[in-house]
Image (cartoon, rainbow, N blue to C red):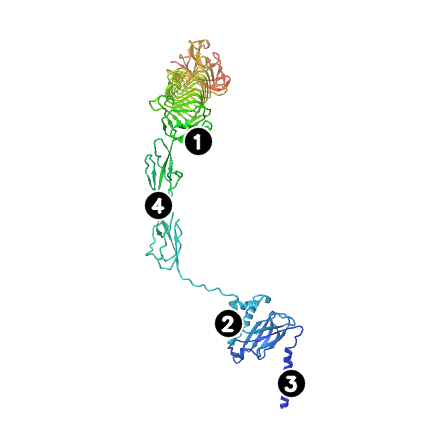
Amino acid sequence: MLKKRNLLFLSLFILGILLLSSCFLNPPATEGILKGQIMVPEGTVQTKDLTGQALPDATVNIIDLTTGAIIATTTTDATGHYQVSVPPGGPYLLEAVKGSVKLEQITCSVEVGIEYDLGTADCVTTAAALIAQAMMDAGDNPADINCADIIADPNFDDVSSIVCSTIKAGGDPTTSALVQQAVEDFLNPPAPTPTPTPTYYTVTFDSQGGSTVNSKAVEPGEKVSEPTDPTRTGYTFSGWYKESGYTNAWDFDTDTVTTNVTLYAQWIINTYTVTFDSHEGSAVSPITDIPYNTTITLPTAPTKESNTFAGWFSDDPTFLVPFTASTPVTADITLYAKWIDPVHDITKGIYYPTIQLALDAADSVNGDTIEVDEGTYDESITFPAGRLIILQSLNGASPPTITGVDGSAIVTCTDSLEDTTLKGFMIMHNSGDSGRGIAITAGYLTINNCTISGNSTTSGGGIDNYGTLDITGSTISGNSADYHGGGIENYDGTLTITDSTISGNSADYHGGGIENYEGTLTITGSTISGNSAPYGGGIFNYGTLTITGGTISGNSAPYGGGIYNYGTLDITGGTISDNTANDGGGIYLTSETEVTIGGSGNFNTFTNNKKVTTISADQHIRKYDDALDSVDCHWDYLDNDYSPAEVTSYKLLVINNSALLDDLEGNINPTDRTISLTVPSGTDLTGLKATFTLVTGASAKVGTTSQESGTTSNDFTIPVTYTVFKTTEPSKITNWTVTVTVSP
């Protein structure tokens, strides 16, 4: 019996040796080797009697992760070690099972003929394997899964701890719901539960244009601390309000915060005072209560004798910062008056106290321009000979007045250069003083936008010209002369008047408005009105006079109310109206006259020129006839729109009318263009023939029937209308109404 037992033992021993030796033989050429040790956590129930917690006699399965098939198996030895041959591939799942204890590990990939020591398979590798399997179940590629990365994740310890606890308690980590949840939480971490914050309300401060004030967080029912007052340029802070309309102020001592709230800053605009220092000029009162950043209406400029006010300045005495009506007031300020001399040579940049000083200092080379401020200048001035000077007003709306010296001309020009100019002045002697306004003894002068008024002397009360004078846009009025040229005397000079007015002037002999004596006078677009003199109330011409356009009206004289012409006259396109005279209400022409009135379509208009004692239209033009030694109405100017008696006589003669017993002469009213006759009762009016005389070159029609004097009959039972026109100008038509009245 013993012998059999010994033989059995020997056989088993030999078999064990053979089996044991087979683990260390070289692997088949088609496989690799995996080896390692299986360990359980300290305190595992089923293995508490095992030293070192190695797991002996456990079944070790190598499982294909793709198919789940077991491709190799072995058993751990007494120390928990194992070694197993596996085909190349992987990674594989290593599963160690003993009773209810189960551990796992993901292997490396296996190559033929290579031995791989996998180290320890324990609860940590089990946790990593479970996570890897879950990742593969979710679709991840096994080759892309790195167990080292899984173990390095900071959340891995949570899974590992639960797996180890499950194994220690004898549970199966692969089926444990707690482990499965831990793996799920690892792969899909739940959203963190937000940390609750304490409840509070926000108080927002709207500074309404002021500096920024930060909002504050306040617990419900608490009071908010009052912030530092905001600032705003030009305004004073006056508190925080609950509404933007500023009706309910916030009380920081008592009001509590029960919701989010916005507080609004209220501002009161600052007001300031502007004080004026006139620097010895007339006093100027301060302006008070000026709101911040608004402009003011500047006061009336102060005055200072012999100085011109040049504005208000905020810097004294440099006067570099002007203060104007557009400058906003942002603080209390004192403004200082700047004074300068009133006459400024802008070419030189120098100021002078009088006009004459500036004229004397003018440069003959540069042709200085001198500006004169508004005001009255009690001086007579003389333009220096041989210089070109433009003397002009600074302010056209308020022209300066030069009054001159009593008994002297106010302005004198002697040999001034061409383009010398006087612009924008009032030339007027003081009341009671005498002297002409302007005297040009030689040279040139242009007068532009000036008024020459209230001056008197022997000749040329307003202007006396012996040179070359050009007047534009000016008024010569209310001047007088003892002899010639109440407004202007042009004596052997060249005078051009454009767009100007010559009115209300008078002379005791020739030319109430203008006398042109042996000079050349050209008038364009101007008005000659209300002037008076014995000869030529408006104009007396003893030179060459050309008038284009304009108006000659309301002038009066015994001879030539509008114009007395003793020289050469050419007048076109003008209006000659309402002038009066004993002879030549509109124009008086002497026998020496060379005259062109109208022509070539440039017609004049003559209306209501009359003899002083009668209302008669035959006073438009009168001409003296040397041969007859008389003055007759002058009808030779039919190219003009005036109202002469185109019908000079109108009669019903017995010789042409068998119905009449006596010759009858018509009563001609040239103003109304009517002719009236009275015939005895019973006269047949149906076929009367009129005998009439028309001015030279005129003809007449009744309707479409041409009228021949003493031949053409008309029915006078109703008024008959004659159309009178010049044969060469049929478009110039006047209508005459002939009325025959039958006596009772």
Task: State which tag comes first along the sequence, 3 or 4.
Answer: 3
- Residue for badge 3: 11
Q: Are marks 1 and 3 in contact (CB under 8 Å)?
A: no
Q: 327 and 574: which one is in front?
A: 327
Dot 4 crowding, Cα within 10 Å, few <14, some 14–19, many 20+: some
Q: Amino acid at mark 3?
A: Ser
Give the answer, above or below, for where 444 lies relative to 73.
above
Which mark, by number, is residue 348? 1
Which residue is the extreme one toward the right? 29
Using the numbered discs, state the Cα–Cα distance from disc 2 to disc 1 in whole angstroms: 105 Å
Using the numbered discs, state the Cα–Cα distance from disc 2 to disc 3 in whole angstroms: 47 Å
- Residue for badge 2: 161
Task: State which tag comes first along the sequence, 4 or 1.
Answer: 4
- Residue for badge 4: 270
| SS label for mark 3 | helix
Foreground disc of the pair 1, 3: 1
Residue 535: which quarter of the image?
A: top left
Dot 3 crowding, Cα within 10 Å, few <14, some 14–19, many 20+: few
Dot 1 crowding, Cα within 10 Å, few <14, some 14–19, many 20+: some
| SS label for mark 1 | loop
Task: State which tag comes first along the sequence, 1 or 3.
Answer: 3
Using the numbered discs, state the Cα–Cα distance from disc 1 to disc 3 in whole angstroms: 144 Å
Using the numbered discs, state the Cα–Cα distance from disc 3 to disc 4 in whole angstroms: 121 Å
